[in-house]
Amino acid sequence: MAMPAGIGIIDTLIGFAHESVPDAYAWVHRLTRDPTALESPVEFLFRDVPDKRLRGVADRVAATVDEMDRWGIEIGMISVAAAGDDADEALRRYPDRFVACVNADPNDPGGRQAIVRARDTWGIRAVALFPAGTSPPVAINDPRMYPLYAQCVELGLPVFCTAGVPGPRLRLAAQHVERIDEVMFDFPELVFVIRHGAEPWADLAVKLMLKWPGLHISTSGFAPRYYPKAVIDFANTRGADQFVYAGYFPFGLSLERIMTELAQLPLRDEVWPKFLRENARRVLSL
């Protein structure tokens, strides 16, 4: 059950420290009902947000690569938005260390075309969705999401979608886990990866993963000691192929904390390589 060394981890949620944390998250703060003066919208959940601690670093891309090297992460999936941003630079400087995803907006009438452009420009391997974080919120099973799902099926791209109670102080209704069932019924070919734990409906997420083989769950947004027990039990039994590693560096958690706590995770020997590498390789078509 010990965590293996030298496996070449694939991290499906990693990024770079922001030069200005308040500016980077201004779009979230505009949508929240937050009575506090937080720089990061999730810092009330995490004691030591690396994003704030690293904001003065001279080379943000190199800083992330250094952390990846330190903790055995071979490839990281990053969100790219525009030419010249940190992710765009990382893909050019370290093409063997990063793969791209793009955040899609269901409120954008040109959302399908944006996915195609991102595929042609950066070779994206996935599409990310944040239902509670769109303006206005768009539920997981809302008809406005369906053109994006259809485009992903057409291009063979997986969807990484936040589900469960959002970390920022946003309304949660758009992310109720039961909504995924309708999407999987209508798009049985879709590869759908739940982000941020599906809490407090992890038991329901497990039931849905038993039902839909294209449904997966990743571990982003949670320190390993808080991974839902239902998900760990599922990974150790019938769900080993649907359990995908994701960190949360530097947005909320340090890789040091993640990797230190991962070593204590009670996973069976045969689950580790699938969790840390093989499932992500398959989902992202690497």
Image: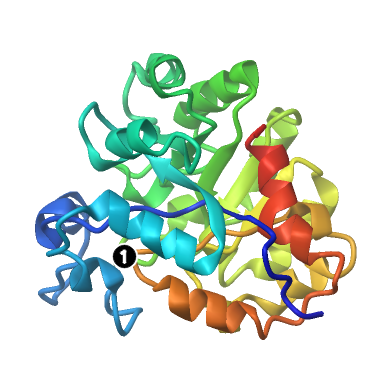
- The x, y position of residue 65, in whole percent, is 39, 54
* Quarter of the figure with the N terminus: bottom right
Residue 226 shows in the view: no
Quadrant housing residue 186: top right
In this view, 40 is above or below 30: below
- The x, y position of residue 175, in whole percent, is 49, 54
Is residue 74 rendered to the left or right of residue 122?
right
Is residue 176 rendered to the left or right of residue 88?
right
- The x, y position of residue 281, in whole percent, is 68, 42
According to the picture, the residue beneath numbered tag 1 turns out to be 168
Q: Number of numbered discs present?
A: 1
Q: Amino acid at mark 1?
A: Pro
Residue at x 31%, y 65% (from the top left corner): 168
- The x, y position of residue 240, in whole percent, is 82, 59
Residue 258 shows in the view: yes
Residue at x 81%, y 67% (from the top left corner): 234
Residue at x 64%, y 23% (from the top left corner): 156
Return the residue nearer the eye: 99 or 109.
99
Return the residue nearer the eye: 223 or 184.
223
Q: How is the image coloured?
A: rainbow
* Quarter of the figure with the C terminus: top right
Q: Residues within 10 Å of mark 1 (few under 14, many from 20)?
A: many
Secondary structure under tag 1 reads loop
